[in-house]
Image (spheres, grey):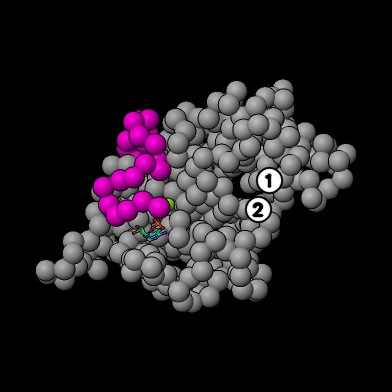
Amino acid sequence: MLRSLLSRLRPLKRSLLVPWRARGGEAKIAVKDVLHRYQNDVEALKNVSINVHPGEFVCLLGPSGCGKSTLLYALAGHVFPSGGQISIDGKPVRGPSPERILMFQEPALFPWLTVKQNLKFALGSKLSRRDCETKATEYLRLVELDGFERALPHQLSGGMRMRASLARALAMDPAVLLMDEPFGALDAQTRGQMHRLLQQIWVNSRKTVVFVTHDVREALVLADRVVVMAGRPGRVLQDLEVRLPRPRDPDDNQLVEMSRQIREAIRSAKAATAPRPGSEAAAPLEEELHERETRVAAGNVPAGAAGPVGAGG
Ligand SMILES: Nc1ncnc2c1ncn2[C@@H]1O[C@H](COP(=O)(O)OP(=O)(O)OP(=O)(O)O)[C@@H](O)[C@H]1O
Ligand SMILES: [Mg+2]
């Protein structure tokens, strides 16, 4: 009786992970048919098209060497794609801009400046001395570093250095935040804290964020959309909308189930594009993501460490 009732209810359950559908309005970031071949002839990206709307949090998810960083650096204006177009607010990207801040796994702070001086240095050209001071204090409080303003970077833990780096990026008030596995070098517990902090900050600021990761659960905790990529050449396999309410917990049953669905989607996509006999074997994408995710969750390996597939960037 109960079982038949449940089976009737099940179809009514709304899917929380659905293919992303383009919405109206101008895209903040428009990537159209982008391809990139490095000088050594590696085809890092092929026919990549993604539109990111203002205020979206998009995660690029994929195995090592699939072109995530190449795409992110192209958005930042540090890599010029061999083909296709990238525009931000309708204008082609021609180089780096303070409107697009790129954050890496290593927090790039000046070691001889205190935490607050690092922020003030970044803000210096934009604001008066007094406004710099106020803004630096405000953003250090936002990332819960008040009390550590006078510390030098080497006197902080890895997580604190990353928070200082995040505070600096946010204080500069960029329109777009580009993050390349920023929490990859942190231990599992600190990474969880950073996820909670970033979710909280993003909900309040609604910045447009493109965040690169190997970790399926990290992508599901943070993103509105997960763009799953595969390598050789780097391309988009799936573009999925995550409809889980925030704040999200990586151990939530629904999120764990969604992570299983993503790996399943990757497996199906891979089967549909199986390599021709005699050609190079396809990257063990789903297996690598699963294995990496498990090892990262257990705190055994930094998420950004080079994996068995492809060459790292
Ligand atoms: N400067 C470069 N010159 C030549 N080839 C490069 C260069 N940078 C990256 N590549 C190649 O391009 C491909 C994509 O690299 P990319 O760094 O974008 O991958 P990724 O998805 O970010 O990998 P990871 O997760 O390991 O950081 C790889 O095969 C890599 O070897
Ligand atoms: Mg990379």
Q: Position of residue 302 (x, y in %)?
A: 39, 36
Please determine whether, in this image, residue 158 is positioned above or below residue 309.
above
Label 2 sits on residue: 207
**Callout 2: SS:** loop
* Cα distance between the residues tagged 1 and 2: 9 Å
Residue bounds of the magenta highlight = 293-313
Residue 39 sits above or below residue 246 on the image: below
Q: Residue furthest left?
A: 278
Dot 1: what SS?
Answer: helix
Amino acid on which the number 1 mark rests in the picture? Leu
Q: Please give the residue where the numbered disc 1 appears in the rendered image.
A: 170
| Pointers 1 and 2 in contact (C-beta within 8 Å) | yes
Q: Nearer the viewer, residue 266 or 146?
A: 146
Is residue 255 found inside the magenta-colored segment of the image?
Answer: no
Q: Residue at x 54, y 61 (%)?
A: 78
Quadrant (top left, top right, bottom left, bottom right) of the N terminus: top left
At 74% from the left and 42% from the top, the residue drawn is 121
> Residue 82, which numbered label?
none
Residue 297 is covered by the magenta coloring: yes
